[in-house]
Image: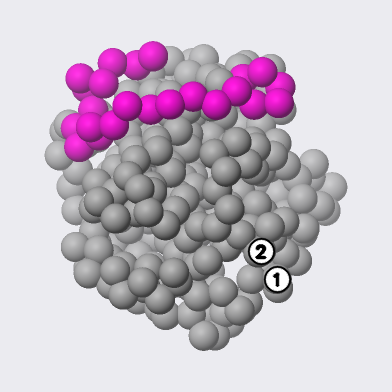
Amino acid sequence: MLTMLLLAEYPFAPQSFVTAEGHRLSYVDEGRGPAVVMAHGNPSWSYLYRNLVSALRHDHRCIAPDHLGCGFSDKPQDWPYRLSGHIDNFSGLLDQLRVERCVLVVHDWGGAIGMGWAGRHPERVAGLIVLNTAAFRSRRMPLRIALCRLPLLGELLVRGLNGFAWPATFMAVRKKMRPEVKAGFLVPYNSWASRVAVSRFVQDIPLKPDHPSWQELVKVEEGLEKLRDKPMLICWGGRDFCFHDDFYKEWRRRFPAAQSFYFPNAGHYVLEDALPEILAVLPHFLAACH
């Protein structure tokens, strides 16, 4: 277990869930009340949601897992790290915790994972909060991410030189991270072995039908239709080099009734750049969901 003394703004005691394959999945479970479940992406972990959990746990049950290979969860070197497996783990955890109904918060890869679960269980979804993410097919990829997918070179960059998690601490934000916050994002990814999921997530982005996760992403996309009547709040950082405005427009096209807030000066980690503004609109939205 990583030392908690290094983690600024993360005063939580993570718990563990054992997946169907025997791996330990770490998660935060704080507070009581209506459930809010938070799915992070790559290369972050539940630390991304630390301030959201602290703000909501007084009157909500806040659940924020670390996907396998991320945060405090196990980092098996031989696990496939495919979208379908992450959805299965996420589903198993929520079943174990007896989450019958929740508001789901998704960011980055958490969009495909969380929406994959939601599409399987729409009756358990009270509302959706979308933060710079996607849950549908796209063939566009920034060059800097494409480089991290190249055979041999990509793995050397991501796992050997930490060329994905470390750059995110300044490329994914417009406001400079304080050193202790930067350390919090990076502390789980301090070696070649610990960065296995960071690399595998990049490799698992499906751009063509022959990709192993393409059909699973198609299922996730098709499942969005089952969620069209759910309350949705979109909070979007406008200065995101990866999930740019085309993704924002696609969410609004698919969910025209969603409440949308666009923050033109916020980056990919929109919760870092626009936290006060997002916290200001959450209470009314959450009250409407429940």
Residue on which disc 1 sits: 226
- Crowding at dot 1, Cα within 10 Å, few <14 / some 14-19 / many 20+, comes out as some
Looking at the image, which is closer to me, 235 or 64? 64
Looking at the image, which is closer to me, 243 or 274? 274
Give the Cα distance between marks 2 and 1: 6 Å
Asked whether 71 falls inside the magenta stretch, the response is no
Residue 143 visible somewhere in the drawing: no
Task: Residue type at mark 2: give it.
Answer: Pro
* Quarter of the figure with residue 230: bottom right
- Crowding at dot 2, Cα within 10 Å, few <14 / some 14-19 / many 20+, comes out as many
Residue on which disc 2 sits: 122
Task: Residue type at mark 1: give it.
Answer: Lys
Magenta highlight range = 1-23
Which of the labelled discs sits on residue 26, or is there none?
none
Q: Are marks 2 and 1 in contact (CB under 8 Å)?
A: yes
* Quarter of the figure with residue 264: bottom left
Name the front one of labels 2 and 1.
Answer: 2
Colour mapping:
one colour
Residue 88, x across and y down, in percent: 69, 39
Q: Main secondary structure of the magenta part?
A: loop
Q: Is residue 2 left or right of residue 10?
A: right
Element under label 2?
A: helix
Q: Among all residues in the image, which is located at the extreme bottom? A: 257
Residue 95, x across and y down, in percent: 63, 41
Which residue is depicted at the point 32% across and 34% down?
185
Which residue is depicted at the point 66% across and 31% down?
81
In this rendering, the answer to whether 230 lies above or below 172 is below
Residue 39, x across and y down, in percent: 49, 47
In this rendering, the answer to whether 48 lies above or below 24 is below
Residue 24, x across and y down, in percent: 56, 21
Quadrant the N terminus occupies = top left
